[in-house]
Amino acid sequence: MVKLGSKVTDSITGFSGIATGRTEYLYGCVRVLVEPTEMKDGKPVESLWIDEQRLDEYSEAETGGPGEVAPSRDAPK
């Protein structure tokens, strides 16, 4: 299950963005609303509903977020 707020990419089209909505239909179809982070001609690109099974989810570390925690410094004496 895709976590809302995570960065996702459609494995078929390459469309990527942030998962902002999720809907589940009566007969099992689950779709996720993907809101792109880029702009085109100064306007936001339209969001798309994509089947959840087509989406690859990325953690912060995979998108360039923090890796290792920096060692803490000792307080001066």
Image (cartoon, helix red, strand yellow):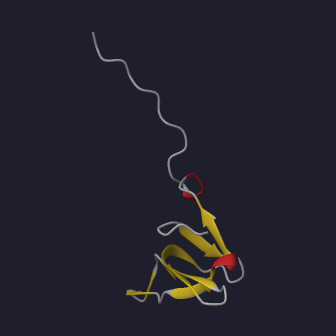
46 shown above or below 9: below
Image quarter where the N terminus lies is bottom right
Query: Residue 76 location in percent, x, y?
Result: 29, 14
* Left or right of 72, for residue 16: right
Residue in view at x 60 percent, y 56 percent: 62
Picture quadrant of residue 2? bottom right
Foreground residue among 64 and 11: 11
Q: Where is residue 35 in the image (x, y as percent from the top left)?
A: 48, 80
Taking the view exactly as shown, the residue that stands out farthest to the right is 12
Find the residue positioned furthest to the front: 26
Residue 69: give x, y in percent of width and height: 49, 36
Quarter occupied by the C terminus: top left
21 displayed left or right of 9: left
Q: Which of 39 and 5 is in front in this view?
A: 5
Q: Residue at x 61, y 66 (%)?
A: 57
Q: Which residue is drawn at 51% across and 66% down?
A: 6
Above or below, 43 relative to 67: below
- Vertical arrangement, residue 25 with respect to residue 66, above or below: below
